Image (cartoon, rainbow, N blue to C red):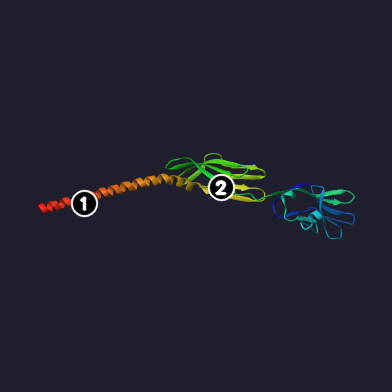
Amino acid sequence: TSLHHVFVLHGNDLHLDIEKPVKLDELTDLFWKFNYSNNIAKCVFNNDPVVFNKYAGRAELFRPNCSLKLKNVQHSDSGDYTAFMVSYADQKVAEYKVIIQDSVTPAQLTVESVSKTSDSCNLTVTCSTVDFNISSSFRCDGKICSHAGKKDLNTTKNLSSLSVYLQQDTIFCNHSNQVSWNQTMKVLKSYCETKTGENNGISICVVKTVVFSVGLIIMVIAVISVHIMEKIKKQK
């Protein structure tokens, strides 16, 4: 019998099957055990399945093959689950390594400007969780953003993983494990435009000042011209 790994979201139900046909008789029962020593439930010949006290209300066995259902799994339910045909000698007919995992939390995605000019922007992007983080550099030229370093970035720790990738002008940070997945994203181009916009704002102020000054000068010249023309008319 081969060992199967099963990952279950905390609070969900665990379902374990026996692949081979189960044939019971008066001298043969089937037991499901946790960590090889704790009896969960058993199937018996021509009678209803029996659930042992510790698992009463949580465990169920289903015919015809005595598959196991364990409700509302907790982290303490992580471990080895085995099914044995018990008669004159024990025969293992199923074996599972069960790992209970929590849903992943959203990763924090931060973007920091390293340098920028009027037509380009260099950024450092960091994707992080409480346990670990991953960083990468990007460059945006006009409407195009690209990796300044490695294109495929991912790291794994404690059976969960972080990955960062670029799609057009949007950076994505994925935090996942075997039972859940969460994605955070930011538009790099708009970030660069926002930062560059601060410089553009100064330029606009200067332009407005110049336009106002020129307009004022023209108005003064016009008033003086009208005054001079009136004097000339009076002299005539």
* Amino acid type for the residue under numbered disc 1: Val
* Element type where label 2 sits in the image: strand
Q: Sequence order check: which comes first, mark 1 or mark 2? A: 2
34 vs 230, left or right, is right
Q: Position of residue 128 (x, y in %)?
A: 59, 44
Q: Residue at x 84, y 53 (%)?
A: 30
199 vs 96, left or right, is left
Q: Position of residue 50 (x, y in %)?
A: 83, 57
Residue 72 is labelled as: none
128 vs 114, left or right, is right
Kindly indicate the quadrant of the structure image that contains residue 155. top right
Q: Nearer the viewer, residue 1 or 222?
A: 222
Q: Nearer the viewer, residue 235 or 34?
A: 235
State the CA–CA distance, disc 1 to disc 2: 62 Å
Q: Position of residue 151 (x, y in %)?
A: 56, 41
Q: Residue at x 24, y 51 (%)?
A: 219
Q: Which residue is mark 1?
A: 223
Q: Which residue is mark 2?
A: 172
Characterize the local packing of mark 1: few (<14), some (14-19) or many (20 or more) Cα atoms within 10 angstroms. few
Say how many tags the image has. Answer: 2
Q: Position of residue 46 (x, y in %)?
A: 86, 60
Q: Answer whether labels 1 and 2 touch (C-beta < 8 Å).
A: no
* Amino acid type for the residue under numbered disc 2: Phe
Q: Residue at x 17, y 51 (%)?
A: 227
